[in-house]
Structures are given as C-alpha cells and as structure tokens.
Image (tube, helix red, strand yellow):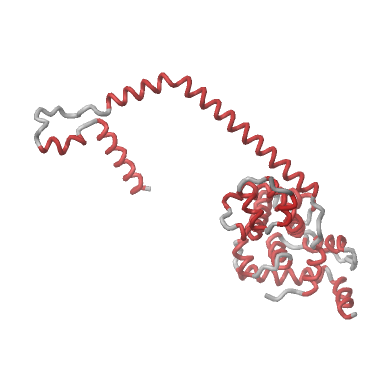
Amino acid sequence: MERDPLLQKLFEIANQDIAGDAFIAGIMAQIDALRRRAIIAWSVGGVLLAVAAWLLTPTLVGAVSLLSQALPQTLIEVEDTSAIVNQVFAPLNSIAAVVAITVLVIALAYRKIF
Amino acid sequence: MLTQDYYSRSPENIVVRLARNGDRRAFSELVSRRQAWIRNLMRRSCGDMTLADDLSQQVFLQAWNALPQLHDPGRFGPWLKRLAVNTWLQHRRRRDPVREASELRDDTTASDDPARIAMDLDTALATLEPDPRLCVVLAYHEGMTHDEIAALTEIPVGTVKSHIRRGTLRLREQLAAYAGKLDGEQDT
C-alpha cells in the first residue's frame, strides 16, 4: 500500500509523547471505584442469600422431605414382584421415572424445535 | 511483593499476564506504556482532545474488564487497538449525526512546532467525513493495510481504498503549506 510521504511525516510528527500521570491516576481511581462497588454488591448479595436461606430453611426442608417421599412411589401396584417383566420395568414404575422421562422429552423437543 | 521497577522492566506479555490475574499495578504499567499511543489515535480520529481522552479512558476501563478474555497476552496491542476503534465507532453511532465534517480551511501556514502540526493535521482531518477519516488515520497513524482496515472497521476493501485515496488528496490540499517546507528540509 502506497502512502503519501508528506502525510506520513506529518502523522509521525503529530504523534506526540503525552504526559500520562493524571490520565493513569484517573483510570486507576475508576478501577478502584468499580472494585469497591463489586465488593459491596457481592457482600450485599451474599447477606441477602444467607437471610433468604435462613428464612426459607423450614419450607425447603419440608419440600425436600415431601419430594423424597413422593418420588419413589410406584405408579402401578404389582403383586408378583419376582416376575422377570416386573423386575425389568421396576425402575420405570415410579413418579421419579415419569418426571425424569418428561424432562428428557421436553429437552429433546426444545432442541429439535429451536 | 513485586516492585514497580519489576513491572517497568518486564516484557509486555508478562505484565499482561499479571494484569489478567487482577494485578492492579501491572495494569497501571500497561496503561502507562500504551496511553500515549491510544490517546494519539483517538485525537487523530475525533479531533477533540477532551473527548479523545474520555474515550481513551473508556478503552482502558473496558480493557481492564475484558482482560481475562484475552487468551494470547502477546496480542495485547492489536486487541487494545480493536477496543479503541470499536469504542470510537460506538461513540459515533450514538452521536448526533448533524455534526459531521467541517468546512475546508485555506489559511494553514506551515509550522515547526509539533503541537501546532498536530493541531493543523487534526483540523485538516476534521474536513473528512467520519469513515474516510478513520480509514486515513488507521492507514497513516497505525500503518495498517487496506485489508486490515476493512477487517477492523467492517467497511468493504474497495471503499477503504477509495476513502484513503480521496482522503489523502484532500489532506494534501489542506496541508499544502507543509509540502514546500518539508520538501525543503529533505533537500538540505
């Protein structure tokens, strides 16, 4: 690429060495302010999360216990549990299996559509 | 703890690695090394010293935030230049489109003072439309090729060439007073 020598020279001369102390100090002050804001935001977020967890603990424990009781429940009552067919399908014969399969189907359909 | 002397003597890719890990003093050293280059680039691009310094500050703040995403510390310079050009392009998009190229001036007299030369050059550059101006600045200030400018600014290569050709002619016309002076200096 050909460049005009006169303009090249003028650009070189105009390329001044600019004193940067105040400029650098300004940038570092802004970075410090950003860091302080981030620390405050994380601290406030952490405190809020801790308070929310403390307040919601009884509800969460209740929900988890309810789920742990509900999910393993069988869908179809089987009389002869020793039959081979029943043993094969036993892992699918629960609320947990239905929930897992539903989530998988929704995820696959979502991937197909979008 | 590392001394300031360590930062100033270290190669740039080492300082970039330290800054990438959140070392504030390493980043301060990087700003110190690159600030004149970025501020000059911004001054040539926008012609307004205050605005140029504001935009340069934005560039370095963005650099601080985005530094962890820079995978190759050896590419810090080109990466910073891309940030600077993008910052300028974004500013231009936000700006009131009424304020565009300035009128031609025909009273430029040649000077020996580098600051005055820089001012005359900025005044001449202000007569160009924003895109040609950016192409000319990247070609002359940064020494970039047509293809590099096209890739950076997303302007077609043909348009870049034409911007630089026309921009050069216009600047030559504006800075004609310097032609004889610099030619004379070269003869002696």
Q: Is residue B94 above or below residue A33?
A: below
Residue A102, x across and y down, in percent: 28, 37
Judged left or right of residue B30, residue A46 is left
Q: Is residue B141 above or below residue A62?
A: below
Task: Identify which residue is drawn at 74% across, 48% down.
Answer: B54
Task: Identify which residue is drawn at 70% across, 76% down.
Answer: A2
Res B98 seen here: no
Task: Identify which residue is drawn at 73% across, 74% down.
Answer: A3
The image quarter containing residue B178 is bottom right
Residue nearer the viewer, B149 or A23: A23
Q: Quadrant of the N terminus of chain A?
A: bottom right
Residue B166, x across and y down, in percent: 72, 70
Judged left or right of residue B20, residue B173 is right
Q: Is residue B32 above or below residue A66?
A: below
Residue B20, x across and y down, in percent: 61, 49
Residue nearer the viewer, A93 or A110: A93
The image quarter containing residue B147 is bottom right
Q: Is residue B65 above or below residue B168?
A: above
Res A71 seen here: yes
Residue B171, x across and y down, in percent: 78, 68
Task: Identify which residue is drawn at 76% across, 72% down.
Answer: B169
Judged left or right of residue A91, residue B75 is right
**Residue at the limit of the structure toward the front, as seen here:** B1
In the rendered picture of this protein, how many numbered marks are placed on residues? 0
